[in-house]
Every structure is written in structure tokens, then in C-alpha cells.
Amino acid sequence: SLKGKNAVITGSTSGIGLAIARALAAEGVNVTLNGFGDAAAIEQERSDIETSFGVAALYSDADLTKGSECAGLIALADEKLGSVDILVNNAGVQHVAPVEEFPDDKWDLIIALNLSAAFHAIKAAVPGMKARGWGRIINTASAHALIASPFKSAYVSAKHGIAGLTKTVALETAPFGITVNAICPGYVWTPLVEKQIPDTMKARGMSEQEVKDMLLAEQPTKQFVTVEEVAALAVFLAGDNARSITGSLQQIDGGWVAK
Ligand code: NAD
């Protein structure tokens, strides 16, 4: 059972990360939340997790585009909870533009947050996991870790990078009771997807409905994945029944990548 384990979930004030934090807390895991947003709303979510699930819930506003703050987030959880047994690298942003117009600062931001932050957090968390002989690292990658779409050069590059990082660290940590896996969702209805609709409309000259239809055209099920489905997969990967699953890229994409 996961009861009493301690988790850090990056980018968990919203969307997939918040759903994973709540699902782990429901299993009795103490959680450290992280991300940006309205302070009162975040505090309400934090305290609701504590009262609903009877676990400890911390919050850190660490900006994970900075390597030192990634390490600081792990150090905070280590200090306040005693260990980081489960690390979910989930924080991520998107920007949609043709490559020749892609802003340099957006490229740097996406590589820093969607790829390098996972490296820095893993580097800080692995020594404790090795010492305890148990650990779970779950990276929220994407279908875009396996295939590309136009106008998402930085995002697709970062997510392919996460796939490589997942496999490499899995090999290094396999003898120590640690597993490292990536979850590769298709389109999940979250603020991240909602926010890219206007830019996609511009880049492709489409209406809002045409963009939604295009996104779902990729997904044979014709339905958005839900955050609860992604969270359930993360909980399974964290559990002892998943001890032989490592270095894997788990598709949860309504059949998109199978096409
Ligand atoms: P979201 O926008 O709802 O959540 C993103 C989270 O990251 C928020 O908590 C936000 O505050 C946090 N964040 C942003 N900048 C940060 C920073 N500098 N430091 C720390 N935290 C920061 O998005 P989501 O859809 O839930 O995305 C979560 C992850 O899932 C991302 O890695 C994303 O690429 C991936 N993903 C999403 C989809 C989808 O369709 N929504 C599909 C595949 C993969």
C-alpha cells in the first residue's frame, strides 16, 4: 500500500497535476503541491486535500524554470515530510507557432520547464530513493513524446527529451527498487489545451470549433482523455504491482499514436 509515502507533484495547482495529487492523497500519500495561481484558491485546495484524505499536504511556489528551485522543492519536501518516495514531474506549458516565428524566449521556457526541470528534480530526489531502496518517478510526457504535430517545435522537442530521460534514469536506478516511467496522454481537457486554442486558430486560420474537431480528429475515440483517467494510471505506476514496469512510455491517448 502507498499509505504513508511522500510525494512531490510538480505543476499540481491545476489540471493533470492536481488530479494526480488528489488521487495519490486518496491512497494515503502525503503530497507536496507546486505551481502558480490564485493564492487563496491554492490554499483552499491544499487544506481540502488534508481534510478530505487525512494526509499532510504542503505547497511550494517554486519556479521550476530555475534548476535551483527544483532542487529546493525536493529539499523542502525532504525536510518537512522526511522523504520523497514518489516524484511526479508534471509541470509544463505549451506555445504554438510556426518554427520561423517561434519566439526564442518561449523555446527557452519550454525546454527549461518541460524538460530540464525534470532532470533537476530527479537529480535531487534519486539519492534518497536509492538510500531507502524504493522510489517511483513518473514523468507526464505526452503523445508528443512519440510523434509530432506542426507548430509545436519546442514542446515536441522537450517531450521527446523526457522520453529519453525516462529510459536513461530507469536503467540507472533499476537495481535500487526505483522505477521511472512516462505517461503519454493524448488531448486531455485542461487549461493547457483550452489556452492553445486561440493561437492554433491563428496559426491554422481556423475557427474554435474547427480547432476542437481537429484535435479530436487525431484521437480515434473522439473524446478528450479525462484528468481522472491519467491520475489513475499514475497511482497504478506508483504502486507495488508496477514494480516491474520501468523505462516505459504509457500511452493514454484514445488510440492516437496507434494510427
Ligand atoms: P495546466 O496548465 O492545467 O497545468 C500546468 C501546471 O504547471 C499548473 O499547475 C501551473 O501552475 C504549473 N506551472 C506553470 N509554470 C510553472 C513553473 N514555472 N514552475 C512550476 N509550475 C509551473 O496543464 P495540464 O494540461 O494539466 O498539463 C500538465 C502536464 O501534462 C504538462 O506537462 C503537459 O505538457 C502534459 N500534457 C497535457 C496534455 C493535455 O492535453 N492537457 C496532453 C499531454 C501532456
Image (cartoon, rainbow, N blue to C red):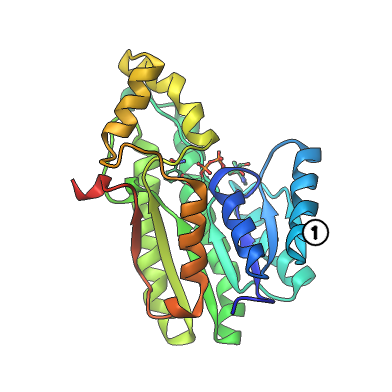
Q: Is mark 1 within 8 Å of ligand 1?
A: no
* Left or right position of 211 against 238: left
- Name the residue located 21 percent from the left edge and 50 percent from the top edge: 258
- Name the residue located 51 percent from the left edge and 27 percent from the top edge: 195
Q: Nearer the viewer, residue 223 or 128?
A: 223
Q: Secondary structure at mark 1?
A: helix
Residue 101 image position (x, y, % from top left): 37, 21
Residue 158 image position (x, y, % from top left): 40, 47
* Left or right position of 44 against 106: right
- Name the residue located 53 percent from the left edge and 46 percent from the top edge: 113
Q: Nearer the viewer, residue 165 or 104?
A: 165
- Name the residue located 43 percent from the left edge and 86 percent from the top edge: 175
Residue 68 image position (x, y, % from top left): 65, 56
- The quadrant in which the C terminus is found is top left
- The quadrant in which the N terminus is found is bottom right
How many residues crowd mark 1 within 10 Å: few (<14), some (14–19), many (20+)? few
Circle 1 residue? 51
Residue 220 image position (x, y, % from top left): 25, 41
Exactly how many numbered labels are in the figure? 1
Say what amino acid the circle numbered 1 marks. Answer: Thr
Q: Nearer the viewer, residue 161 or 197?
A: 197
